[in-house]
Image (tube, grey):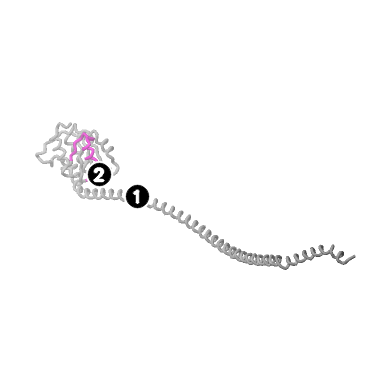
Amino acid sequence: MKPNKVIQPIKKPIKRVSNWCSQLWDGFSGKDTRRLKQLQHRLTLSRENEANLTQQLEESTQQYAQLQHALDHQQSLLASSQQALAASQRECQELWQELDELDAFVTKSHLQIQSLKTELENRTSALANCEANLGVLQQSKSVEASSPITANLPAETPGANLAKWKIGFVGGHDATRRVVTRTLHADHGLIHPPVEIPPHHDAKTSQKQLKDKLAECDLVVSIIGYSSHTLTKSLSQLKDKGALKASILIPNSRGVSGVVRDILSFVNANPDLV
């Protein structure tokens, strides 16, 4: 056979293989090399990003730990503040309770002071009248042993009959009221036992009690020199309101003779009141 005829049939396959090998080599040496470099570059970038992210993660973890520590510290401070607030509230409640107790004590003390002032006024008045009536006691003893008091009355004071009269005494020394009552019974016909409101009843006698005790009296003798202002004021208020039918007589003297004289003068001047 001719050489050309032998070579010609295999020439085309060899050429194809040669082209394929050339393309394969070009691929390895060209495009694939560039793609491989690109992949390597991306891998390098990814590793750098990974390193950066790892570093950021570590920093974030540290920041989280610091924030958690700060949060725990703040929560501890908050718990301490809440405990201090609760203690302050309890202390405040105790202080308010003590203040209420102190206020009640002050109010009670004020009432006691007022009571003591009233008692002091009464005792001061009683002491002054005791001194003033010391002579009355001596006089009453001499009157009981000798002559009736009417012998000492002025001549211009005529006798009076007190048989119909109901008399009340407000205030006055016990001895004064006793001797005046005995004199009016013995010498002037007084029949009805007088109603007596002693000065030591000042703090206990209300206006209603005073009104009830003096309701039937025709004449009330108020010896203001030996009676507290409260009792005298209550008597005056009852009279102003028309709660008493009795006339009010305030003697010019606290002695026995002066009281008897003023009573007889009033009765003589007002015979038609009873």
Residue 118, horizontal then vertical, whole percent = 28, 48
Q: Earlier in the sequence, mark 1 or mark 2?
A: 1
Q: Which residues are magenta?
A: 226-249
Name the foreground residue: 84 vs 30: 30
Q: Are marks 1 and 2 in contact (CB under 8 Å)?
A: no
Q: Secondary structure at mark 1?
A: helix
Residue 3, horizontal then vertical, whole percent = 87, 67
Q: Quadrant of residue 59?
A: bottom right
Q: What residue is disc 1 on?
A: 107
Distance in Å between CA atoms under marks 1 and 2: 22 Å
Q: Is residue 185 visible?
A: no
Q: Residue at x 23, y 39 (%)?
A: 237
Quadrant where the image shows the N terminus = bottom right
- The amino acid at mark 2 is Thr
Name the foreground residue: 161 vs 235: 235
Q: What residue is disc 2 on?
A: 230
